[in-house]
Image (tube, helix red, strand yellow):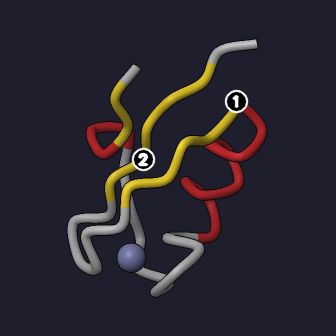
Amino acid sequence: MNTYEFTCPDCRRAIPVTDPMREATLSSGCPVCGRSVSGEHFAV
Ligand SMILES: [Zn+2]
């Protein structure tokens, strides 16, 4: 399974995420602050 590093552009938290977590974050926003995010905020 692929993992990505999500970095929130708002709260600056960097969180390692798996594919399902990436999808959930894209639909629900940052798990820390709730900001909506897009694919550009995920690094492989
Ligand atoms: Zn955030």
Helix, strand or loop status at disc 2: strand
Q: Residue at x 38, y 55 (%)?
A: 14
Q: Amino acid at mark 1?
A: Asp
* Residue for badge 2: 6
Q: Report x, y in % for residue 42.
A: 38, 37
Q: Report x, y in % for residue 26.
A: 55, 53
The quarter of the image that holds ligand 1 is bottom left
Left or right position of 35 against 22:
left
Left or right position of 17 against 4:
right
Picture quarter with the C terminus: top left
Please rate how many residues cluster around mark 1, counting C-alpha atoms within 10 Å: few if below 14, some from 14 to 19, many from 20.
Answer: few
Q: Residue at x 76, y 12 (%)?
A: 1
> Where 7 falls versus 34 (above or below)?
above
Q: Report x, y in % for residue 23.
A: 67, 44
> Where 2 falls versus 8 (above or below)?
above
Please rate how many residues cluster around mark 2, counting C-alpha atoms within 10 Å: few if below 14, some from 14 to 19, many from 20.
Answer: many
Q: Residue at x 71, y 46 (%)?
A: 21
Helix, strand or loop status at disc 1: helix
Q: Residue at x 49, y 53 (%)?
A: 15
Q: How far is disc 1 from disc 2 in space, using C-alphas?
A: 11 Å
Query: Residue 25's image quarter?
Result: bottom right
Farthest-out residue, top: 1
Farthest-out residue, bottom: 33
Left or right position of 10 against 24:
left
Q: Report x, y in % for residue 5.
A: 43, 37
* Residue for badge 1: 19
Identify the mark nearer the N-term, 1 or 2. Answer: 2
